[in-house]
Every structure is written in C-alpha cells, then in structure tokens.
Image (cartoon, helix red, strand yellow):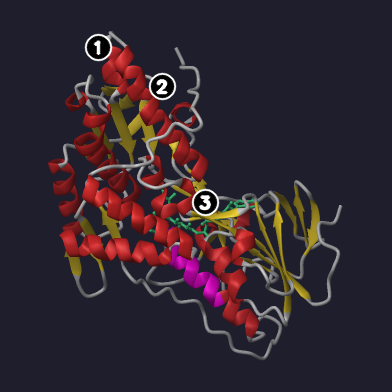
C-alpha cells in the first residue's frame, strides 16, 4: 500500500521529527517541494529535560509537542505516523509498518538509541532514559521502590530498594544524579517520614577519569564538587562489567547491591536497514561535507545518526547533541531551497558546525557552562541553563508550564508530579 498518492512537486521524505528532522521540515520551501515527515511517535521529544520527568519535576506533556500541531496549515506538507523498517535504495522507496512511500530525496534523521555495548544482562535489567515512556518508567520505579521499602522488614532488601546507581557521568548522568540528590534532601523525607531517607544512596559511575568528558576540566571539577556536596557517591575509572537485576559488578571485583540501575552511558545511531555495511561506521551513517550519504546522492543523513569525519575539528564526527542536529537541519533546508543539489553548476558550501557551548545543571542554583571565550559556574550559570532550556522547548504552552513548575519547585522545595500513573513491572532476575 502506498501511504501517500498525491504528488505534484519533487517529494522530500524526512524520517524522524527530532531536533534535526523538524528543523529541516519547518524550513523547506513548500512551493518547491512536497515534504513528507515520518515519525514513529506523533510528538517531538525534548530529550534534554527527560531527567526532570524521571525525577517528578516536570509532567511528560511539557517536554513533548504534537508534530501535527507544529506543522499544521502548511501546504504541501504531510505527516505520517509510521515506523520505517527499510530503505530500498534502488527503487527510491521506504518501507514502513503502514505501507510504502517513494521519494525523490530522502533525509534520514532518526537520532540514536541507547548503547549497552552488547551486554544483554544490562540491557534486560538496567533502565534507559531515551524516551518519554522510559522516563515515566523510571519515575514509577523510584516511587514504587520507596513504597516497597516502607513495607519490607528485611534491611538488606530495604537498602537495595533505596540504592540508586547511575552509569555514565556525562551531562545526563550528572543532571540525573543532582536531581535525585535533591529529591533525597528536600522531598522524600516529607513523603516517607517512616523511612530513614539518609540510608538512600546515589552512586554515579563513570568509566573515564573525570565527569563531563565533553566539557572543560574546570567544569568537570565543579560538577564533581557540587555532586559530592549533595551526597552523591562518585566512582571514577569505574567500568561496569555486568548487572543481574540485584548486583552491579564492577571491574576489580567491586560490587554494589541495588534494584535500581539507570543506564546513561552511551548512545549509538538509530540505523534503518537498507544501507551497505561500508556506508555505516560506529553505527552512524557516513556522510560527505554536504551531509549527503557517500553512495547515494539522493539520500542525506543529519543529527545523531550522521557521521561526518572530514571536518578537521571533529575528525570523529560531531557531538551527538542538539546543536549539531539543529544546525545540520538548517543547512540542508537552505541548500535545498536554493537548488544546490539539482543545479550541478552551483558551488555548494560545506556544512560547518558552530559550537555555541555546552552546559549542565547540578541541582538547585548550580550549573556549569562552557562557552568559547569564558566559563561560568553557580547561580548565573544555572539561570542561563534555565533560560536556554526554556527558549529551546517547542511550544509556548510547554515553556509556560515548565517555567511555572520551576518557580513553584524553587519556592516550595517540592517536586509536584510524584505520581505512579502507569506502574512499572520489573523483569525477572537472572539467578
Ligand atoms: C536524556 C538525554 C539528555 C540529553 N541532554 C542533552 C543536552 O542537555 N543538550 C544537548 O545538546 N543534547 C542533549 N541530548 C542529546 C540530544 O537530545 C540529541 O543529540 C538530539 O535529540 C539529536 O537530534 P536528532 O534529530 O538527531 O534525533 P532525535 O531528537 O532523537 O529524533 C529522532 C526522531 O526519529 C524518530 N525515529 C527514529 N527511528 C525511526 C524510525 N525507524 N521510523 C520512524 N521514526 C523514527 C524518533 O521517534 C525521533 O522522533 C540528550 C539526550 C538524552 C537522551
């Protein structure tokens, strides 16, 4: 079945309505092209704030936005809710769960998935945080475990329920550890007066020698200090070998007993079948300086899934973060709009990533920001962090709700969405 029969103009199909896909979709000229955007969800997810959903700070709908709402009333624009399974590069056609669709040009913007580095045990038992349903699982699990901890008389079981291990000391792990520590310090003692919340342990495990690998040494040290002050136990140089649902096994025979392992240790490109092995490296699609796949001139890849290795500042590809994705989306839309890829006489300028800096928050009043010419920490950095995240959220309603939540939490020392709406069911443990 063909999922779209109308076709008057050249058709550009975009797979993925994340930061990259949405940007290109919004900017492409629809008097010149028919634009078809496909996503397996009917909403865009603002992933940088997933950790706030997981720790009951924000409602899930305040970090999601309906794709149809974003693109409504745009002529020659079509959205299809579908999962793309295969790209038939010979027939210039994609195969989805609802039917097939031909394309003149294809833009793959499928983002990334959690990388467990091949460890099936960890994949079965640890909790990822890459989507809204996963963040909600985490929120439910945290609250369910405290409910269970009140009931159990078994002190070892109680400790395991109240011990949280976050694997991965990048911005996501750091922000999550900070938010959990704030729950421990300000929220949980009031919710569970019969539990000794001081027994709650938050461990942050990082494989390398420092936190926040992509940021400056100065910011990494500051984040370490802030997390330590909040009571987080930080393990550097710590490689997780396995997790069986009960015990985290760390190299050099160290162990942590816990029922809660949150995996933020890595992502890999979300590849769709149809590409040749040689066109993929490290689970990302190889592209040239124009974001064109190396074999197929009509297929482009942008965002986390794309790997451009020719830039001398980023020989291993751009960081898998929102800014490169947005800038690549913008670049491609501009180049399409001025006919770059069909007018052979046009000299095309290559894509150049402009790094606007990086930041991470470590709980209330604390953040670190690295910009090109200066670095910031503390309250001012935290205000900048909030401002940047607020303006980047898609949709006016979402910005207002997030801001209101943050103001209320700031003055009430509270996290308002401590709800187990959809209970999380743990998988059976390996014995
Ligand atoms: C917890 C977390 C925190 C983060 N924090 C930050 C941060 O603070 N700052 C920062 O810059 N970056 C952060 N990132 C990274 C940032 O979110 C990503 O780099 C960015 O989302 C990449 O954009 P993208 O468009 O390539 O992919 P995505 O935004 O992931 O979008 C991909 C889209 O493709 C769709 N899709 C995938 N496969 C298919 C398929 N087969 N069929 C149909 N649709 C499909 C998905 O549903 C999704 O909508 C964070 C990521 C996570 C997970």
Residue indicated by mark 3: 112
Q: Few, some or many C-alpha atoms within 10 Å of disc 1 (few <14, some 14-19, many ≥20)?
A: few
Q: Residue at point 26% right, 31% down? A: 188
Secondary structure state at the residue bearing disc 1: helix
Q: Residue at point 48% right, 43% down? A: 114
Does the stretch in magenta take in 211? no
Could you tell which of marks 2 and 3 lies nearer the N-terminus?
A: 3
Q: Main secondary structure of the magenta part?
A: helix
Judge: label 3 CB < 8 Å from ligand 1.
Answer: yes
As measured in the structure, the alpha-carbon distance from the residue carrying label 2 to the one carrying label 3 is 25 Å
Could you tell which of marks 3 and 1 lies nearer the N-terminus?
A: 3
Secondary structure state at the residue bearing disc 3: strand
Secondary structure state at the residue bearing disc 2: loop
Name the residue at the top extreme.
153
In the image, residue 170 above or below residue 160: below
Residue 329 is situated, as x and y percent measured from the top left of the image, at: 54, 70
Q: Tag on residue 155?
A: 1
Can you see residue 159?
yes
Name the residue at the bottom extreme.
345
Residue 368 is situated, as x and y percent measured from the top left of the image, at: 22, 59
Residue indicated by mark 2: 245
User: Closer to the camera, 3 or 417?
Assistant: 417
Mark 1 against mark 2, which lies toward the viewer?
1
Confirm or deny contact between disc 1 and disc 2 (CB under 8 A): no
From the viewer's perspective, is 382 left or right of 309?
A: left
Q: Residue at point 48% right, 23% down? A: 426
Q: Few, some or many C-alpha atoms within 10 Å of disc 2 (few <14, some 14-19, many ≥20)?
A: many
Does the stretch in magenta take in 326? yes
Start and end of the magenta stretch?
Answer: 319-331
């Amino acid at each position: 079945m063909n999922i779209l029969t109308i076709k008057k103009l050249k058709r550009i199909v975009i797979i993925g309505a994340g930061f990259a896909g949405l940007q290109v979709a919004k900017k492409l000229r629809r008097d010149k092209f028919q634009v078809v955007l496909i996503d397996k969800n009917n909403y865009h997810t603002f992933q940088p704030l997933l950790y706030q959903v997981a720790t009951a700070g924000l409602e899930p709908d305040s970090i999601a936005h309906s794709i149809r709402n974003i693109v409504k009333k745009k002529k020659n624009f079509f959205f299809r809710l579908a999962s793309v399974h295969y790209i038939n590069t010979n027939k210039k056609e994609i195969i989805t769960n609802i039917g097939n669709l031909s394309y003149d040009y294809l833009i793959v913007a499928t983002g990334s998935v959690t990388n467990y580095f091949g460890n099936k045990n960890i994949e079965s038992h640890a909790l990822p945080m890459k989507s809204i349903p996963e963040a909600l699982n985490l929120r439910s699990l945290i609250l369910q475990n405290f409910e269970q901890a009140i009931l159990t008389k078994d002190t070892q079981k109680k400790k395991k329920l109240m011990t949280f291990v976050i694997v991965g000391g990048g911005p996501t792990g750091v922000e999550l550890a900070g938010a959990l520590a704030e729950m421990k310090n300000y929220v949980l003692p009031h919710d569970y007066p019969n539990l000794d919340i001081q027994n709650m342990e938050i461990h942050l495990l990082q494989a390398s020698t420092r936190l926040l690998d992509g940021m400056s040494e100065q910011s990494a040290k500051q984040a370490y200090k802030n997390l330590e002050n909040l009571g987080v136990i930080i393990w550097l140089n710590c490689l997780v070998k396995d997790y069986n649902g009960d015990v985290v096994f760390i190299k050099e025979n160290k162990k942590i007993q816990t029922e809660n392992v949150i995996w933020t240790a890595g992502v890999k490109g979300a590849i769709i079948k149809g590409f040749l092995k040689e066109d993929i490296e490290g689970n990302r699609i190889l592209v040239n300086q124009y974001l064109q796949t190396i074999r197929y001139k009509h297929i482009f890849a942008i965002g986390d899934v794309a790997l451009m290795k020719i830039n001398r500042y980023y020989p291993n590809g751009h960081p898998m973060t929102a800014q490169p994705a947005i800038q690549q989306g913008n670049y491609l839309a501009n180049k399409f709009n001025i006919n770059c890829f069909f007018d052979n006489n046009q000299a095309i300028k290559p894509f150049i990533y402009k790094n606007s800096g990086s930041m991470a928050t470590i709980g209330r009043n604390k953040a670190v920001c690295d910009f090109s010419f200066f670095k910031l920490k503390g309250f001012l950095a935290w205000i900048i962090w909030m401002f940047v995240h607020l303006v980047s959220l898609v949709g006016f309603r979402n910005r207002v709700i997030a801001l209101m939540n943050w103001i209320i939490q700031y003055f009430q020392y509270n996290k308002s969405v401590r709800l187990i709406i959809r209970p999380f069911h743990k998988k059976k443990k390996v014995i």
